Image (cartoon, rainbow, N blue to C red):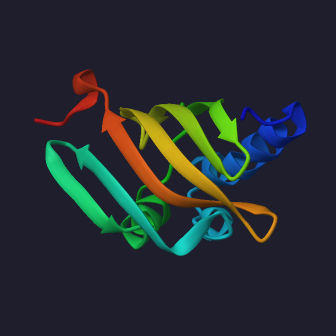
Amino acid sequence: MRDKIHEYEAVAEAAGKFVKSVAEGDSSYAKTLFTDDAVLFGMLDGTLEHGSIEQFYHNVDTVGAGDRFKARIDVLAVEETVAVVRVLEEGWGGRIDFTDFLLLLKLNGEWKCVAKAYNQNSDTIKK
């Protein structure tokens, strides 16, 4: 069953921690969003990244977003205890555009991200 609008707002606020971490180059905000056992999947410059969310934290802390970074959060679905969020990123690290999909679960009354899968736009892949 589709949830109430206030839950969509709560999910968007939670996903905002992800965007704030990327924008500021500081993983500490995202660490409050992701569960300790969250997973990451995606292709970065043609190389598969998969496994622990720690790789995402490392990327955020070492690359930084850059001055041209922009992001948009779209809450795609909220179904009582599960939510799907799409985050559009432009100009990460000064050159990369991503589409991220975050899978969130409502755990102990709080929206937590358990998985991140992403696509790097093909026109931003470093050959």
Indicate the position of residue 92 as horizontal and vertical percent values. Answer: 45, 40
Quarter residue 78 falls in: top right
Quarter residue 52 falls in: bottom left
Specify whether residue 13 is in view. yes
Q: Considering the image in quadrants, where does the C terminus appear?
A: top left
Residue at x-position 54% and y-position 34%: 86
Q: Name the residue nearer the viewer: 125 or 68.
A: 125
Residue at x-position 57% and y-position 40%: 84
Residue furthest to the front: 1
Is the residue 110 above or below the residue 35 in the image?
above
Indicate the position of residue 56 as horizontal and vertical percent values. Answer: 42, 61
Indicate the position of residue 1 as horizontal and vertical percent values. Answer: 72, 35
Lateral position of residue 36 relative to residue 9, left or right = left
Residue furthest to the right: 6
Lateral position of residue 87 relative to residue 81, left or right = left
Marks counted in the figure total 0
Q: Name the residue nearer the viewer: 30 or 117.
A: 117
Is the residue 108 above or below the residue 76 in the image?
below
Residue at x-position 27% and y-position 28%: 124
Indicate the position of residue 25 as horizontal and vertical percent values. Answer: 56, 57
